[in-house]
Image (cartoon, rainbow, N blue to C red):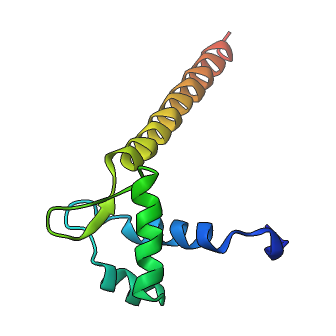
Amino acid sequence: MSDNTRISESGARCLRVMKALRGNSLQGLSNGELAKGLDLSPSAVNRSLGTLIAEGFATKLDSGRFALSVSALQLAQAHAEEMARASARINELNQRVAAGSHH
């Protein structure tokens, strides 16, 4: 987006926290690790995590660390499945086109 005046800073911060949680679903990350990695204050990270948890995109693990929620992972899985179906349809069409070119 070229017009930065139309960006929600808190929304952008939440998305940065989500990206940082990527690949840490089992062990999670601490508030401090997120704050250091994102160059944010722990309180800013805490507010973003609160929003993400309230909206179902993050969870607090039993260890006290944070990870993407099952809902967030399901969102990613749904996208992967959609892409796999589209790829299968394209492959099928390519095979039909190739088979028809032999006649």
Q: Nearer the viewer, residue 87 or 5?
A: 5
Q: Quadrant of residue 23?
A: bottom left
Q: Is residue 53 above or below residue 35?
A: above
Which residue is found at the position 37% from the left and 80% from the top?
34
Return the residue nearer the eye: 47 or 8: 47
Q: Measuring from the top left, give residue 18's x and y in whole percent.
A: 45, 65
79 sits to left or right of 6: left
Residue 9, x across and y down, in percent: 65, 74
Indicate left or right for 63 with 7 as reference: left
Indicate the quadrant where residue 11 lies. Answer: bottom right
Q: How many dots with numbers?
A: 0
Instruction: Give the quarter of the figure containing the N terminus.
Output: bottom right
Percent position of residue 83, x then y: 52, 37
Q: Residue at x 82, y 75 (%)?
A: 5
> Residue at the location (31% across, 62% down)?
67
Outermost residue on the left side: it is 63
In the image, residue 73 above or below residue 61: above
- The residue lying furthest to the right in this view is 3
Tell me the residue at 54%/66% (across/down).
15
Q: Quadrant of residue 74?
A: top left
Q: Residue 65, position in %: x, y?
A: 23, 70
Name the foreground residue: 97 vs 36. 36
Above-or-below relation of 96 to 30: above
Q: Quadrant of the C terminus?
A: top right
